[in-house]
Every structure is written in structure tokens, then in C-alpha cells.
Amino acid sequence: MTAGDLFALPGSLATFASHFPPDVQPWIWVKSIAAALAGRNLAPDPGLAIPAGVSIEGAVFIDGSVKLPHVCTIRGPAWIGARTDIRPGAFIRGNVIVGEGCVVGNSCEFKNALLMDGVQVPHFSYVGDSVLGNKAHLGAGVICSNFRLDQKPVSIRMTDGTIAETGMRKLGAMLGDAAEAGCNAVLQPGCILGKRAVVFPLTSFAGVAPPNTIAKVRTGAPAFFPRRD
């Protein structure tokens, strides 16, 4: 599997193209985010009105058409593309690239992440060490877990049963173009969703979801017990 099987870097991010070739393993793109931003002269558009409650620290480019909330924190290095909507309480904490027309949602945290055009992360999510393809969508409360409980390097069980060793201690999710995860899903470290793949709400998902598939946990009918208080 290559990055090109999952997503295509949009024209809005062409300035970073040399760092994100399509013929490498998708987790290599996660490793490349910091290098893509390093050494760039990053600063907000001079015509952008920055509300008093918006904290900007370090090297941060923000396009002049970005919608800023009354309060959020953006720590560089970061690059935020045109017509993106940053909502109240968002926390961008370094090595984050955001394409055009994205939603960086309220009380969401982003760290070492690449978001391509039209990505929507509207509410209460964590996106760390991850790549979200064009028009990918996370429902409220989706967590891109990036660190194994046993602290071992992240490995990925591919669809053919083989194990890919990434050598990375921190690796989140890689969502192909138009992939989605429903509310309160947990995407386990190193999970991959193919293009237009869907993970159902409340699902803990690990491994690889092929393109155009739906992943869900089947449960029986709810059981009810009397209260004893």
C-alpha cells in the first residue's frame, strides 16, 4: 500500500509536494510533516484580523480568508490554508498543515497532522500524528489514538494478514479521501481507512479498512436490569 492509494495531495498544498511523494508508505507522510514546514518563513496574512483571544505562538502562516474564532491557540510551526473555519477552543500545537476549506472544530486538538482540502473535524476530537485525506470527516468525539498502551512501536496488520512494522512509537490514523469515522469512534494507532471507507459510531477500529467498506461492531439487543438504589 502506498500513500497514492489513499489520497492525492491537492493543488492548494503544492508548495509541500516534494515532501509527500505518492509512491511511499502512507505513514512516511506523517514522518515528513515537520520537515515540510521547517525553515519556511511563516506568518499570518497581514490583512487578517486576529481577535484578542486568539493566541499565536511561533511560526504560523494563516491565509487572509481563514475564519478565526474569539478564542483558540495556534502554536507553530503551522500552515493554514484558505477558507478554513477555525472554531472556538481549537488547539493546534505544532507541525500542522491544513488545506483549503477545512473545519478545525471546537475543543479539538491537532498535533503533527496533515489535513487536505475539505477535511471536517467539527467537535471534540484529537488528531495526532495523522493524515486526513481530501473531504475526510470525523464525527463528534472521534479520537485518533497515536500511542500504544504498551508503548511499543506501532505495527499495522494489513488486509492480507501481513504485519507492517512502521518503527514509529507515535502514529495515529491515515484516512483516505472521503473516508469517515462516526461519533465517538476510536481509531487505534496506525489504523488506515481506504478511500470512502466508513467506521461506525462507537467503534474501536484497528488495522486497515479497504476502500468503499463499512466497519462496525455488531452488538445484540440491550439488556436491562433493575436499579437497586
Image (cartoon, helix red, strand yellow):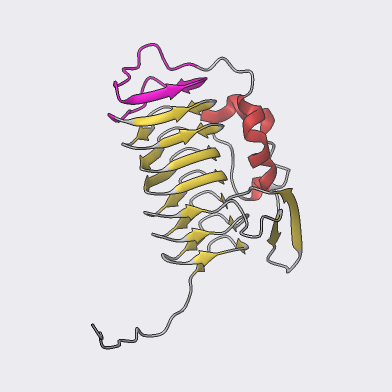
- What x and y, as percent, mark residue 185? 45, 61
Span of residues in magenta: 43-70
- What x and y, as percent, mark residue 83? 37, 29
Report whether 55 appears left or right of 29: left
Residue at (53, 33) in percent of width and height: 96
Q: In which quarter of the image is the C terminus?
A: bottom left
Q: Main secondary structure of the magenta part?
A: loop
125 vs 226, nearest the viewer: 226
Residue 222 at least partly seen = yes
- What x and y, as percent, mark residue 205? 54, 64
Q: Is 103 located above or below residue 63 in the figure? A: below
Q: In which quarter of the image is the N terminus?
A: bottom right
Residue at (55, 29) in percent of width and height: 13
Q: Is 177 located above or below residue 203 in the figure? A: above
77 vs 191, nearest the viewer: 77
Q: Is 92 located above or below residue 15 in the figure? A: below
Residue at (40, 39) in percent of width and height: 104
